[in-house]
Image (tube, grey):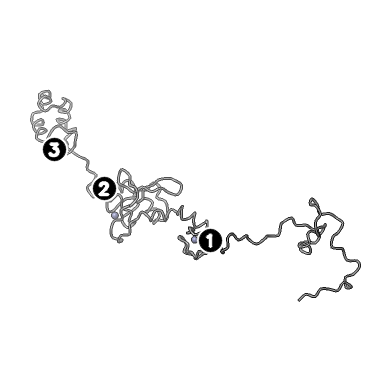
Amino acid sequence: MRVRPAVDAVPEHEEPAVCAVPLRGEPQGEGQCCKGRPEQRGQAAGKVSRKPVSAPRKQYGPYPRRSFDKTCQRCGVSFTTTHREQVFCSRKCAKRAEHPDEVTRFMANVPLLPADQCWPWMGRLTSWGYGAFKRQGGKETRAHRWMLEHTRGEPLGKLFACHRCDNPPCVNPAHLFAGTNADNAGDMKAKGRARSARGADHPHTILTAEQVAIIRANPIGRHIHAKNFGVAKATIDAVVWRRSWRHVP
Ligand SMILES: [Zn+2]
Ligand SMILES: [Zn+2]
């Protein structure tokens, strides 16, 4: 309990409550002087702080503000908020949730399948059937290529990302290997995919293998063959000189 000092105890030389020097820029009011307002005295001797003393936050309505105990949707931290719709603990979490990093975005398109199976890309596919993935900067890459670079830990550069399983949308790293163009072509040849359409398999062909045999048996008179089979004379020449239909004996 504070004891009010006796009036006699105040020395004669102490300053009066209101001094004669006015406060700069402000009209002199009750208790104001060059030493500041009465409540500021003692905090800053001689220097006047213009910062107003913060009042307690105004309470609107008769009830206290409701607060909600929540769990952050991204990092799982528990927090309290007065906003009912808030789902993230911080602006940082909200931003990260809206713009997830590259690995998170990639893995969202990878199916959860056993390691020995193909993992077909669930996102967009290119016209050649490979997975399309946009990197962090907007540049697009093939999904299997991204996966191989990610598992290798270094960029592929000029190397090719090849499939062991011959399944273009597959992004299973166990089915991928980095190879040169020659490796890729050799791989295709070994699997029998390099052969292009020959002879009657080709959609633009007119002659048949039997007709080719007839032409080669009678190489003289190309204009007659051309008229009979409905092709140009140069086509007959090509057959006779074995520039075309080379696989037929
Ligand atoms: Zn969070
Ligand atoms: Zn595969």
Q: Position of residue 247 (x, y in %)?
A: 16, 39
Q: Residue at x 31, y 55 (%)?
A: 119
Comparing 1 with 224, the one in front is 1
Q: Residue furthest bottom?
A: 1
Q: Residue furthest front?
A: 62
Q: Tell which tag, 2 or 3, sits nearer the viewer.
A: 2
Comparing 214 with 161, the one in front is 161
Q: Tell which tag, 1 or 3, sits nearer the viewer.
A: 1
- Compare marks 1 and 3 and give the one earlier in the sequence: 1
According to the image, label 1 marks what residue? 82
Q: Residue at x 28, y 46 (%)?
A: 185
Q: Which mark is residue 188?
A: 2
Q: Residue at x 30, y 48 (%)?
A: 184
3D distance between C-alphas at marks 1 and 3: 84 Å
| Residue type at numbered disc 2 | Met
The secondary element bearing badge 3 is classed as loop
Q: Position of residue 195 (x, y in %)?
A: 22, 43
For residue 200, side relative to residue 131 (left or right) = left
Q: Which mark is residue 228?
A: none
| Residue type at numbered disc 3 | Val
According to the image, label 3 marks what residue? 248
- Compare marks 2 and 1 and give the one earlier in the sequence: 1
Q: Is residue 91 above or below residue 201?
A: below
